[in-house]
Image (cartoon, rainbow, N blue to C red):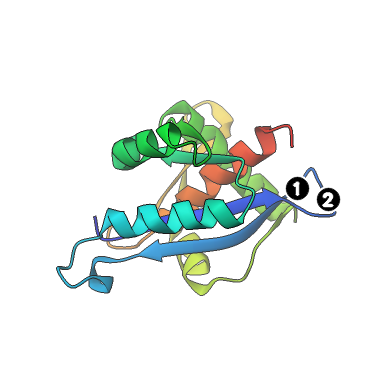
Amino acid sequence: GDMFGISVVSRHPTHHEDAAIRLVKYWSPKDFADRRIDFDTVDKWVRGFCKVHNVVQITFDIYQLASLSQAWNKDRVSWVKAFDQGSERLVCDSLLHKLAISGRLTHNGDKVLREHIENCAVRLQKGEDSKMRIVKKEQELKIDLAVATAMAVKHILELNV
């Protein structure tokens, strides 16, 4: 791929029913000598981050992180849970939008995350106003961090923490 991103999300420290985007981390092929994302580097970063912070769950896209997630699970790095890109994705994209427009989502101000959010358009599901999918406004734009954040927000709000 041409980018890989991670979004670190928690409950809001004073408004527990809200979400807070704490950090986004991203890698691009141009960051590596052979112009390919080195997932060993991603693995080391995730493991290091989880050692220092109380990470309750890592949620991931099964199509990109199957082998790494199996290793994290085996090594008990954190609780690892796959994310459904179908119906669950529709719910999480809608939730992210609702939280953002209602002021219940805070973020750290990361410029690349803001860019990815601004690159988004939405596609409503026929006959279901409560479900929408984040899509690219234009094919060449990046929205990876917006999608990762939507997945993380949904999962943190479902957890009993």
**Amino acid under label 1?**
Asp
Dots 1, 2 in contact, CB < 8 A:
yes
**Distance in Å between CA atoms under marks 1 and 2:** 6 Å
Q: Nearer the viewer, residue 79 or 116?
A: 79
The numbered disc on residue 18 is 1
Between 40 and 58, the one lying in front of the other is 40
Quarter of the image holding residue 95?
A: top right
Q: Which mark is residue 15?
A: 2
Q: Residue at x 64, y 40 (%)?
A: 156
x 63%, y 57%: residue: 21
Residue 20, horizontal then vertical, whole percent: 68, 55
**76, 160: nearer the viewer:** 76
* SS label for mark 2: loop
Q: Is residue 65 above or below residue 103?
A: above
Which residue extends farthest right? 14
Q: Using residue 87 as the reference point, say whether residue 68 is left or right of it.
A: left
